[in-house]
Image: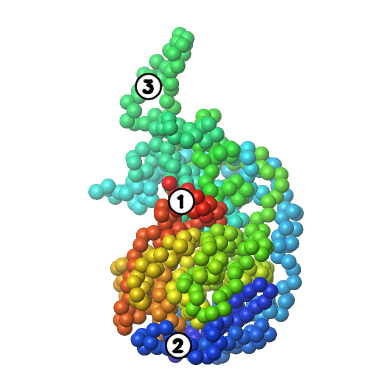
Amino acid sequence: MAAFFLYLLFVTLEIPLVFRTGSVEVYGSANGDGSTESSDSRVGFRRSPARRMRETSKRISGLFFNETVFDVVTSLDEFSALYKTAKQAWFSGKKLWEELESDKLQPDPIRTDEKNSTEQQCPNSITLTGPEFLSRKRILELPCGLTLGSHITVVGKPRWGHRERDPKIALLREGEQELMVSQFMMELLGLKTVDNEEPPRILHVNPRLKGDWSGKPVIEQNTCYRMQWGHAQRCEGWNSRADEETVDGQVKCEKWLRDDDGTTEDSKTVWWLNRLIGRTKKISYNWPFPFAEGKLFVLTLTAGLEGYHINVDGRHITSFPYRIGFVLEDATGFYLNGDVDVDAVIAASLPSSHPNFAPQQHLEMFKKWQAPSLPVVLGQVELFIGILSAGNHFSERMAIRKTWMQHNLIKSSNVVARFFVALTGRKEINAQLKKEAEYFGDIVIVPYMDNYDLVVLKTVAICEYGVQNLAAKFIMKCDDDTFVRVDAVMKEAKKVVGNKSLYVGNINYYHKPLRDGKWAVTYKEWPEEVYPPYANGPGYIVSSDIAEFVVSEFEQHKLRLFKMEDVSMGMWVEKFNSSKPVEYVHSLKFCQFGCIDDYYTSHYQSPRQMICLWEKLHQGKAQCCNWR
């Protein structure tokens, strides 16, 4: 009964709306003859009868649901949480889709955003007292971002160290119960570049007075996109190397006194005496660490031509070069938190014009970015790539269209790629999404309210589209922040000789569910102690017979669903493997976190990093950007 409900609930996965240039179609089998069979009868199942392509005018009739089924299945305890989520998502999505189809959403979202942006003022400077800064949750909003020459000054005082039993920046030594810690974080945030997501940290500066794993005071700087950190730049009191690149002529790290320098107070006296008697030989003086507990400081962060510069009490301390994908105009928030008391925050030399932060601005409506026509003959597609995306990720989709979707294998339709997107609660985003889908022809809209727990159903939709609409030999799933080396992925899939079933990716073995924290999984959701072997979600491949098995199990109401889609696929492959051997192909080059050189896929890539990776590929280099 549970599987029957899910089949009825997500029957539109049988007919998701595939938008092509100038028209909207509902997909079924490309044969349209109603007789297509599974490519591998040895598995013991057949593909459902192929369906003819429905006419545009009849597509709404496919969205009929028997809504009384909800009342029956919600009493099942094991699946009640999923049903509740699915029920809410279906009813909300159905209403939104009906509004879209009836053209009730008339305002142009791009014009509205542009009008609002021009009305918003761009102050040249902003000043907040300490109490005012605290009342704003320690965030100074910068309406128009930053520009060359902008600077932010903080007057504050580090707090005295406190004891922590679970320090985040060090490990307790054997026998230690706690550690003295004093640190604070200063960040530039891209508040307007995302919606209901963790904002990118365009710059992260973390002075650690006490508690660092090194046992010394340090200043750590970094960037972060979608909770994935780049390579940290640590200033530990040593001078930057002579051969190391500078930032606007400034070294990345200045030297300061360390406990192991052997420098005493006598050296300060000698330094001053030498100055007084007029010695001509240049004598250097090493200053102490720029921050001290209970001591007032004045810090200034300046945006230079090549990067950021930090001065404390009038002295240059560190410089951090700009990284690809993290730009000044996106820095619309300044955040300061931790063991520090703030007396004042001043931002000055801010831009006078207001950039357009509307996500839709990234759409480039040119025909060269439209998806190529699908092959006329079924079975010509070797690889289908389904890309999970969110409604407001316009810039992410545009970046993929301009980069790896321009690969010759995709332009020739030997490989086909499509975005799978659900609806959002913002009507103007849905309206713009529909226009985007109609123009580019590369989006499959799943008409439900987007929800993390239901991502697994998009994965089922990817399998169904790949086998029933394209009859592709291989099905790949990835995310919209994943950069794919299409040719390398194809070669990896073809390494398996013959007609063997395969499961390719960065495969995890004997992983245990997290039972607490943000990503906690309850025993009701997953009663087993370990997960089956599964490939990480940012990029994996299955052979067509496995994808057909997933679709068949779904249609026969036998498919067990779990909110983590990559674990679900591992579970399905494990079940398939019990009837037909599957070759598991593991490779770390399907990167889960960031990028490695000679990658097959790289994850957590911002739109600008996508462009950088594509440019490097054109130079014959499969090298990373900002991951050095």
The residues tagged by marks 3 and 1 sit, at their Cα atoms, a distance apart of: 53 Å
Classify mark 2: residues with Cα within 10 Å, few (<14), some (14-19) or many (20+): some
- Quadrant in which the N terminus appears: bottom left
Residue at image x 42%, y 25%?
286
Label 2 sits on what residue type? Glu
Name the residue beneath numbered marker 3: 265
Classify mark 3: residues with Cα within 10 Å, few (<14), some (14-19) or many (20+): few
Q: Secondary structure at mark 2?
A: loop
**Residue extending farthest left:** 175
Residue at image x 45%, y 10%?
279
Q: Are marks 1 and 2 in contact (CB under 8 Å)?
A: no
The spot of residue 164 in percent (x, y) is: 36, 49
Q: Which mark is residue 37?
A: 2
Q: Which mark is residue 595?
A: none
Label 3 sits on what residue type? Glu
113 over 210 or under it: above or below: below
Front position among marks 2 and 3:
2
Residue at image x 44%, y 40%?
219
Label 1 sits on what residue type? Lys
Classify mark 1: residues with Cα within 10 Å, few (<14), some (14-19) or many (20+): few
The disc, 1 or 2, on the residue closer to the chain's N-terminal end is 2
593 over 94 or under it: above or below: above
The residues tagged by marks 1 and 2 sit, at their Cα atoms, a distance apart of: 42 Å
**Residue extending farthest top:** 277
The spot of residue 539 in percent (x, y) is: 44, 65
Q: How is the image coloured?
A: rainbow
Q: Secondary structure at mark 1?
A: loop
